């Protein structure tokens, strides 16, 4: 039989009204006193489910072995006892000793004491000097005697206690502090029942129950047990493996603080910060995620630990992937270098962790190359595949590799093979129960099935992600990308209105969380839809909307990290009238075009102009633009080589090659360029490059410079300016003429 209170409280999924809660508490207390809690729960099944959903999970997660799960009355009685204890003015546990003056004189204690004694949670202790009652006297009568109050006053105290208890129980979801206090009460109950002593026995008990909780899918209880078992490594692994669920648990943060306060080991603090960053990522708090990574970076730098540096640089690269591809690429390169320094020169003898992290970094580097449609991704993936073949690596690392192979093959147009790799990745992630990676892979499968024109499966995988996002915290990037993929499926079906809605949802999420890469893609897709709608309707508003999104796509893309995005967006309006079904922006490029996309694209445009009849001036200009593009490529490659030489102290090894390259450049340099190169080399210890260039410009334009002019030009004192000019003359860079105020300095003839 279910009462109206059952229906009222069940209709409110979170917090029932005060009158309903007070009515429920009244009947629940009466059932406890009468010893009929089991019967009460059978008669009020909805109320029992409400209590289980909001309050009993911590109890069962801690003390399940000492409670009869088939008869939840024991768990409810424990909950009631704890809840009444929470009403103590000193916030202690109900079973802790209560001072004499609290029993007799402190009126603030009387509501909780009346409640506990009236309903059988505490006996009334004898105070013979204050009141002499008889053995079977009711608790109400004894307390009236102890307090020297009438019955009406006593029941006012009792009603106040009931209201406070009802308010506490209706205040859901419970705070982290209350849930942790309830777990502690349940643990004390379990230890009393099993007779466990403090110390090693209890730590072993916590470790055993943590394993059971993980098997049962109760990650919050597992984390609590691991925190009290003193197993920091297992605690961190649980945080990493179950970040999706634990990001939704308020208890997670205070437990992390508790574990962090108990450890001084740099590596444990480092790993804890990385796990903490993962939780902030789940919650969409980029600022705190980055702050956690930076704290971890400081620990690694202070320890001068190459392995830790490699790990945190890789994590920072992953953080910047959706925000700034250039920074992500730089971090991944730093990660690979540090991991090599940690002992990967001979990968057969290197530590397993270093190899695992190195492969993960290679996969992430390959992923960035894939995002740029750079075919060099294949070579990087093959290197990672070779390491996986030689070493037994964790399923998560192998799954990352499969995931990236799938995207690489998708962009190469090999959709069946791409699906094979993605499904292998999904199987591995499901095997290790990595919820976040499962969701990301499902989103990717949605995109590939959409391109393969299997729209039913595309929608199925996308909606699987979005359905879970309604019940738990999911990375904003995954949700945004899933809306995008769902929009792509609608686009291929020519349902442009629905595609536009999905792209807009993706854009809103990306902008809210500063996911610039995703926002750029969303703007591009919205522009494409708008232009196609304009093609169908001729409505100028559609064209205007397309122009707006195209401009936004170019503007928001981070630092031109992917030139194909900018170029494709600029061409979009022009190309939209052509065949659209097979048009795909994200396809692999020729290797040289991928490395120097802007320059090679410019060369191709100028070659097209040269192929057509035209004025001589136009052809001359085209040849000069081509020459400038190739010169830019040469300069970029030279600077990249010099950077590596400097970083790895290889100057002596490549001195001849650099001299030969310098001679090649010098053959075509103007007098001004030669002077600039000579001065930069000779004056590096005296003045900055900027001041050097400014001085040369002045000498070439005016023919000379004096002391006051040099001092003003370089923001120096007259005395320092005089010393600099004398030194430059001594080095043969300047010639002094005149004396006193008429002294001038000129370039040698």
Image: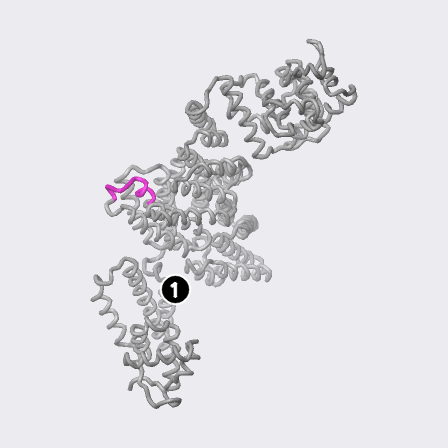
Q: Nearer the viewer, residue 105 or 41?
A: 105
Q: Which residue is mark 1?
A: 598
Residue depicted at 69% across the width and 23% down the height: 24
User: Can you say whether 108 is above or below 129 in the image?
Assistant: below
Q: Is residue 315 magenta?
A: no
x and y percent of residue 715 in the render? 43, 76
Q: Tell me if 174 is positioned left or right of 519 in this view.
A: right
Up the image or down, 645 lies above or below 99; here it is below
Q: Position of residue 266 (x, y in %)?
A: 39, 42
Does the rendering let one see residue 615?
no
Depth check: give the residue in front, 406 or 390. Answer: 390
Which residue range is magenta in the image? 347-357
Question: Residue 74 location, x and y as percent?
Answer: 57, 18
Rendered image quadrant of residue 427: top left
SS state under label 1: helix
User: According to the image, what is the colour scheme of the structure?
Assistant: one colour
């Amino acid at each position: 039989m279910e009462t109206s209170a059952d229906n009222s409280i069940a209709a409110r999924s979170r917090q029932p009204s005060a009158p309903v809660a007070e009515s429920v508490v009244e009947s629940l207390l009466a059932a406890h006193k009468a010893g009929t809690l089991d019967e009460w729960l059978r008669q009020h099944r909805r109320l029992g489910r409400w209590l289980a959903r909001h309050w009993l999970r911590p109890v069962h997660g801690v003390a399940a072995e000492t409670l009869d799960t088939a008869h939840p009355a024991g768990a409810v009685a424990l909950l009631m006892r704890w809840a009444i204890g929470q009403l103590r003015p000193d916030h202690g546990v109900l079973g802790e000793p209560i001072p004499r003056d609290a029993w007799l004189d402190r009126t603030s204690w009387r509501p909780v004491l009346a409640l506990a004694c009236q309903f059988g949670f505490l006996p009334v202790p004898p105070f013979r000097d204050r009141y002499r009652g008889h053995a079977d006297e009711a608790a109400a009568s004894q307390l009236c005697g102890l307090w020297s109050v009438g019955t009406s006053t006593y029941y006012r105290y009792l009603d106040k206690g009931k209201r406070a208890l009802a308010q506490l129980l209706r205040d859901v979801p419970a705070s982290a502090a209350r849930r942790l206090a309830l777990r502690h009460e349940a643990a004390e109950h379990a230890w009393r029942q099993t007779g466990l002593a403090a110390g090693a026995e209890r730590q072993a008990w916590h470790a055993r129950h943590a394993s059971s909780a993980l098997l049962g899918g109760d990650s919050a209880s597992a984390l609590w047990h691991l925190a009290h078992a003193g197993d920091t490594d297992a605690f961190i692994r649980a945080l990493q493996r179950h970040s999706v669920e634990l990001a939704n648990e308020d208890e997670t943060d205070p437990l992390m603080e508790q574990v962090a306060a108990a450890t001084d080991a740099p590596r444990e603090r480092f790993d804890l910060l990385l796990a903490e960053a993962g939780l902030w990522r789940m919650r969409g708090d980029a600022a705190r995620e980055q702050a956690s990574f930076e704290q971890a970076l400081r620990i690694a730098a202070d320890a001068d630990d190459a392995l830790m540096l490699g790990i945190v640089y890789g994590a920072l690269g992953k953080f910047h992937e959706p925000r700034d591809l250039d920074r992500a690429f730089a971090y991944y390169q730093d990660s690979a270098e540090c991991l090599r320094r940690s002992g990967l020169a001979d990968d057969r003898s290197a530590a397993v962790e270093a190899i695992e992290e190195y492969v993960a970094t290679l996969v992430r580097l390959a992923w960035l190359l894939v995002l740029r449609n750079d075919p060099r991704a294949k070579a990087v993936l093959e290197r990672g595949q070779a390491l996986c073949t030689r070493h037994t690596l964790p399923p998560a690392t192998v799954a990352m590799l499969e995931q990236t192979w799938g995207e690489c093959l998708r962009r190469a147009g090999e959709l069946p093979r791409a699906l094979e790799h993605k499904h292998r990745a999904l199987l591995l992630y499901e095997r290790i129960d990595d919820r976040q990676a499962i969701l990301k892979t499902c989103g990717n499968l949605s995109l590939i099935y959409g391109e393969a024109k299997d729209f039913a499966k595309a929608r199925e995988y996308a909606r699987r992600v979005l359905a879970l996002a309604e019940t738990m915290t999911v990375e904003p990037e995954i949700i945004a990308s899933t809306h995008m993929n769902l929009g792509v499926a609608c686009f291929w079906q020519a349902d442009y209105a629905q595609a536009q809605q999905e792209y807009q949802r993706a854009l809103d999420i990306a902008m809210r969380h500063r996911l610039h890469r995703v926002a750029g893609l969303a703007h591009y897709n919205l522009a494409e839809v708008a232009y196609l709608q304009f093609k169908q309707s001729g409505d100028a508003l559609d064209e205007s909307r397309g122009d707006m999104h195209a401009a936004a796509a170019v503007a928001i893309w981070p630092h031109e990290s992917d030139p194909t995005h900018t170029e494709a967006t600029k061409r979009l309006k022009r190309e939209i009238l052509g065949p659209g079904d097979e048009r795909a922006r994200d396809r692999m490029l020729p290797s040289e075009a991928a490395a120097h996309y802007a320059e090679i694209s410019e060369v191709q445009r100028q070659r097209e102009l040269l192929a057509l009849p035209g004025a001589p001036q136009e052809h001359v200009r085209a040849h000069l633009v081509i020459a400038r593009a190739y010169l830019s490529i040469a300069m970029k490659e030279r600077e990249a080589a010099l950077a590596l030489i400097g970083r790895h102290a290889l100057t002596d090894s490549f001195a001849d090659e650099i001299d030969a390259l310098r001679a090649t450049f010098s053959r075509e340099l103007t007098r001004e360029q030669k002077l600039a190169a000579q001065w930069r080399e000779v004056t590096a210890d005296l003045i900055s490059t900027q001041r050097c260039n400014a001085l040369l410009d002045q000498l070439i334009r005016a023919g000379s410079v004096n002391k006051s002019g040099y001092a003003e030009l370089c923001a120096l004192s007259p005395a320092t300016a005089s010393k600099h000019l004398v030194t430059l003359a001594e080095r043969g860079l300047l010639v002094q003429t005149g004396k006193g105020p008429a002294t001038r300095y000129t370039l040698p003839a």
